[in-house]
Image (cartoon, coloured by chain):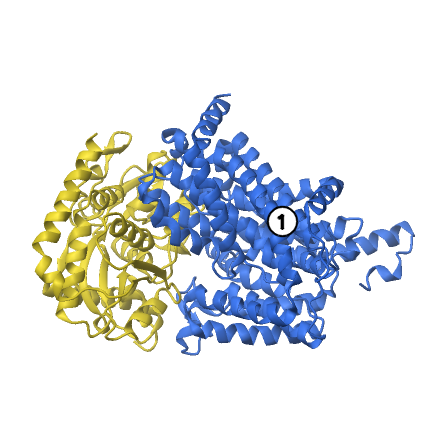
Chain colours: A yellow, B blue
Amino acid sequence: MKRSAYLAFGTIAALCASGIVAPATAAWEPVRPVEFIIPAGTGGGADQMARTIQGIVTKHNLMKQPLVVINKSGGAGGEGFLDVKGSAGNPHKIIITLSNLFTTPLATGIPFNWKDLTPVAMLALDEFVLWVNADKPYKTVKDYVDAVKAAPAGTIKMGGTGSKQEDQIITVAVEKATGARFTYIPYKGGGEVAVQLVGNHVDSTVNNPIEAVAQWRGGKLRPLCVFDAQRMAYDEPIADGKAWKDIPTCKSEGLDMEYLMLRGIFMSPRATKDQVEYYIELFKKVRATPEWQEFMKSGAFNTTFLTGADYAKWLEVEEKRHQALMKDAGFLASGN
Amino acid sequence: MEELVNLFHGFAVALQPYNIMLMVLGIVLGVIIGVLPGLGGANGVAILLPLTFSMSPTSAIIMLSCIYWGALFGGAITSILFNIPGEPWSVATTFDGYPMAQQGKAGEALTAAFTSSFVGALFAVIMITLVAPLVASFALQFGPAEKFAVYFLAFCSFVGLSKEPPFKTIAAMMIGFALAAVGLDSITGQLRLTFGVTHLLNGFDFLIAVIGLFGIGEILLTMEEGLAFRGGKAKIDLRVVLQTWKELPKYWMTSLRSCFIGCWMGITPAGATPASFMSYGIAKRVAKNGKNFGKGEIEGVVAPETAAHAAGTAALLPMLSLGVPGSPTAAVLLGGLLIWGLQPGPMLFVEQKEFVWGLIASMYLGNLVGLIVVLTCVPIFAAILRVPFSIIAPLILVLCAIGAYSVHSSTFDVMLMLVFGAIGYLLKKCNYPLAPLVLAIVLGDKAEEAFRQSLLGSQGSFGIFLSNPLVSTIMILGLIALFWSVIQEGYTRLRGTVAGPGSRAA
């Protein structure tokens, strides 16, 4: 009952939105199917988000042309970025990005920079949480840091997704902040990392909420802190009466590190203002649907939405930050 | 007991006319997807996923999982008829299935393949029904070392149990490992062997290699041998199906063994491909007619198909209970679950009973429907063989090219496929086996990743591969498989009986 009410509201909101922006959309519209590139494999966070968007667009009929999702995961996403970079002037190609927008070119030296693409919008930011196995005695960040410090250097294993990407950057930052030494073990996907933690094959992880929430609810994992400036907004209880909101920030627990991952949209180079405007309006409509809000809640996303100059400025700052973090960690490719 | 009640409730859900209609639709779509090489189950499910958003989650998963079953069934069709495996796990089916088709026994081969698939799936579903809660915790014991041990076992059983000269097998395998190393090194995050070529960022896709090596290579060989398609005289009707069925119970031992291998490999997230190879390798060594394997032995079709289908089905269990997809198709299904607002994981069995048991019931029914659909179509598939080679060869070439193109929508891949075709032709001419090469491309990077993850965790100590009973057992099994010929020879020598000198020549 409640759900259908939401649905009706969402539809009305979407209709209103499309009514208001009608003149803008008339300016440019896709004339053939739009390729939606994912610079990551199937089943990961970016893939889930892109496929959710595809589902919402289809279900609510938000586009006249079909939206076709294509995974181009080669070379830590480099394949996808180079593909879009090489499609200058083709407005029928958009790409969803994660932090590999910055890390892949820096770590592998492929000829690509985000400025090669046309920024459209930031859809959301993905949080990172420090997780341990629920059987372990550490209840707080302090317990955990003390245990890591007490163990011989390198015997504590941190599991994460990919190498020289966001999870390892956070790991290095935690090492810096605490003076402890981890052994970082890279895996292919976040779901696999969470399961390795449940099986005690690694000692801690920095999984995104959506990757580990099922194991948290199953009582297998325990979140210690979130790498954000403020607590997450979602107060619905998940496990043991605890909600995402009850997880303290790492900073407040004495672990001074903040990291959020971009979930944003870009177009191919040399897109016109009208074309960018079309996609911005499209994603505004997507964000208004109940399905999107449900998805944001299930993954405890930070729902910041940026476009235009604000978005470009944010990207600028983050690029510098990644460069600094990766330089510190010694992750830069020899060419950079 | 509660599980049984839940299951019957699940049957009630799956048996609604609407859901049965979706089942048939899914199977037919899946078979078409499975027949087209390149357009694998994962792509097919991904393309059709948005269609299901307006359905209830249970109906949607029934349809999508039926596409999956259909693709599993369909993969065998092109393997047997044209020597082109539509999916990784169908590679082993070509070894005996294609020779059977050449001898005019395509109907028997297809019937055996479909029936074995059904038996394998049924076994796995029964296993899921009975031990779902236990299995989840078993899979958790699999860390990198255990995973590597499984891959090690797959490679070893191929070298040691194969009747090919071991050094040719190893040489072919090494080429595969080299090809698998191209692309991103997932442990250091560096690019390897790409020489700055964008197309190589993703490495060599297994499917393109297989379509080239097997499909194109086979066409080249056939052309050389006189443009004759040797399966022309296939007699196909319902009688063949019934006759094959009469013959199949003889291979119950192979079937049962393959079921176990399949379930085990599906749950420990090793997947259907090593399961099919391993099952074929062991059957070849153990079976009475083992030395005829590769020449069109029906048992050589039964073994890999049973194991592959059992593994493909069992792979859904870790996806549902842990949220870890055991195959790319399972990964796409996982995405679907999330869109429908279902969170796979330990709590799914508790919170979404109707969905889980509806799915399990649809596995029983879907496979039954699938078997009926594909069996009734056997005459149609086999009739393709009566078309003259000069017409069918260009069609296969086009099919191969479409398949290679659709993997990454790239024309470079089509070129690559032709290069692999030439390599496949040359290797066959020099009597190098192609299967170990393919096995190494498929599993090479996974094995390397697991190996290096293990060593990272153990700080470089090889002791990790013998650190607990589970991993030691698998590693030792691998070593036994590797040196099987030597062990067997030593054993026969000890007993003083002289082994026939011809036994190793084949």
Q: Horizontal and vertical percent for residue A174?
A: 28, 54
Name which residue lies at 48% across and 42% down: B24
In this view of the protein, can residue B153 be seen by the observer? Answer: no
Q: Is residue B319 left or right of residue B465?
A: left
Report which residue position mark 1 lands on: B305
Q: Nearer the viewer, residue B488 or B283?
A: B283
User: Which element type, helix, strand or loop, lies under badge 1?
Assistant: helix
Q: Which quadrant, please, contains the N terminus of chain A?
A: top left
Which of the 4 quarters of the picture holds residue B251?
Answer: top right
Name which residue lies at 27% across and 57% down: A173
Q: Is residue B16 above or below residue B274?
A: above
Q: Is residue A191 above or below residue A96?
A: above
Name which residue lies at 32% across and 48% down: A207
Name which residue lies at 65% across and 68% down: B388
How many marks do you count on the picture?
1
Q: Nearer the viewer, residue A276 or B23?
A: B23
Q: How would you rate the neighbour count of disc 1 (Cα within 10 Å): few for under 14, some for 14-19, many for 20 or more? A: many
Q: Which quadrant, please, contains the C terminus of chain A?
A: bottom left
In this view of the protein, can residue A300 be seen by the observer? Answer: yes
Q: Is residue A152 left or right of residue B434?
A: left
Q: Horizontal and vertical percent for residue B354?
A: 40, 29
Q: Nearer the viewer, residue B472 or B129?
A: B129
Q: Is residue B310 left or right of residue B348?
A: right
Question: What amino acid type should be assigned to the residue bearing mark 1?
Answer: Glu
Q: Nearer the viewer, residue B452 or A191?
A: A191
Q: Is residue B428 left or right of residue B504?
A: left
Q: Horizontal and vertical percent for residue B503?
A: 84, 59
